[in-house]
Amino acid sequence: MKTTLHTTRRDFLKLSGAVSLGFLGLNKFAYAASHFSSNEVGYGPLVKDPQGMLNLPKGFSYKIISKMGTPMSDGFLIPGKGDGMATFAGKKGKVILIRNHEMNPEDPEEGPFGKQNELLAKIDPKMVYDFGMGKQPCLGGTTTLIFNEETQTLENEYLSLVGTVRNCAGGPTPWGSWISCEETNLKKGESREKDHGYNFEVPASTKIQLAEPIPLIAMGRMNHEAVAVDPKSGIVYQTEDQHDGLIYRFIPHTPGKLIKGGKLQILAIKDQKSRDTRNWDAKYETFPVKQKFEVEWLDIDDVESPEDDLRLRGFEKGAARFARGEGMWYGNGEIYFACTNGGKNKKGQIFRYVPSALEGTPEEKNQPGTLELFVEPNDLDLLQNCDNLTVAPWADVITCEDRSHPNIVGISPEGEFYKLAENIGFESEFAGGVFSPSGKTFFVNIQHAGLTFAITGPWKKV
């Protein structure tokens, strides 16, 4: 469904493979019907876990591959609050998994340097984005895991970005890196050496190394959540985790070289009286499900936004408003994104954006991209507070719920829902669900438990 809605699922794999295979360094890179489905769409009922952690469908199993506080290969400790993730294919069938950590400076007991930051002396301060005057360093960032999919064992794990704040989600690039997003508007001052609220790029690598912590300033300063890259154009789409957030796109001056800058734009909807998609207030026109609207992208200036007002200025210019944009993922020529408390009951919406065949060019106005509200179930038994999401190899959207004892929920292209997993062991959200490049393993975090799981089973093929 590159520019139409008639592409087969086999084409989906070819197109999403553009994200998965990449172009640099490594050889390969990874990449509204409100009812539960029949077993033909999902995997059948969940089976009670005797270990009291995860209920999964029959034939599936899980393995804990990473636990907060455990020493890593570089001598630091696995940080807590694992969040968004992406996978990349390394050599000899190895999986490179990059994982965000939604850490604050005030949480050293879950940080990589120990409860009193006693390991801080072992790191080069120049490789820490915000060293916090050496007293209270920022502890958010990423870790990289090297996973042997054949043996289902973890072979290596290391700190790959540090000194940032609340790295919530992000997204993989087709050139073999992970964009890690700060969900904060923390400003320089007192114990903070630098402003925060930026994106950072982390290369997918089997080599133990820290990414140079360079903020991608031109992509905007805001409560970032997630990004998705269209491999055809190199354009990067972004969500904003605010109750009155916007959807952004970044057109780089040089595709694949985000550090060289570009133009930030905001999404506006044509021919829709209400610019509020949240469906919260009866005084506004309801944003309908399963109806496509043409969009236009408006320029926005002062992107460093010292007053954290990008979304407010953008709405005044005519942009559409969304309820806490969360996970975002590219697949099959489309981009899906979740709004975790959108909808009439404030329990979640998922949107689908189809880029124009002329996306980002002056001719785009003659054939604009389209936006639709893919699902808004307003049924707590189907979906609650959708957060991170990904697109499965068989083309379904797979989303993690952000609530106590959540589910992982699958949604078919036709809008049928099914449960893929249930967290019965921890009062914590699922986060970062993503498939390996082969599609054989699904990785996911239980955030506050500090655990990363690898789930295997009879996954569907195309």
Image: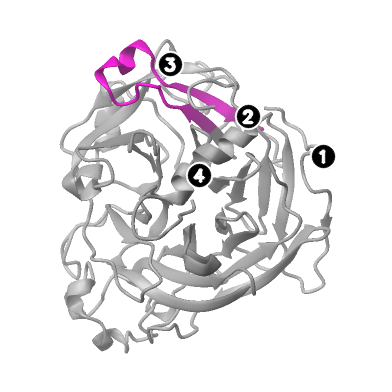
Q: Label 2 belongs to which residue?
A: 8
What kind of residue is marked 4? Gly
Q: Label 1 belongs to which residue?
A: 40
Cα separation between marks 3 and 2: 23 Å
Quadrant of res 149 = bottom right
Circle 4 SS class: helix
Q: Are marks 1 and 3 in contact (CB under 8 Å)?
A: no
Answer left or right for 159 relative to 71.
Answer: left
Residue 327 makes an appearance in the image: no
**Of discs 2 and 1, which sits in the foreground?**
2
User: Residue 294 shows which numbered tag?
Assistant: 3
Among the two numbered marks 1 and 3 on one chain, the one whose residue lies closer to the N terminus: 1
Q: Label 4 belongs to which residue?
A: 17
Which residue: 26% across, 57% down? 186
User: Residue 291 shows which numbered tag?
Assistant: none
Residue 419 makes an appearance in the image: yes
**Of discs 1 and 4, which sits in the foreground?**
4
Question: Split into 4 quadrants, where in the image is the C terminus?
Answer: top right
Q: Position of residue 425 (x, y in %)?
A: 70, 68
Which residue: 32% across, 18% down? 364
Answer left or right for 45 relative to 328.
Answer: right
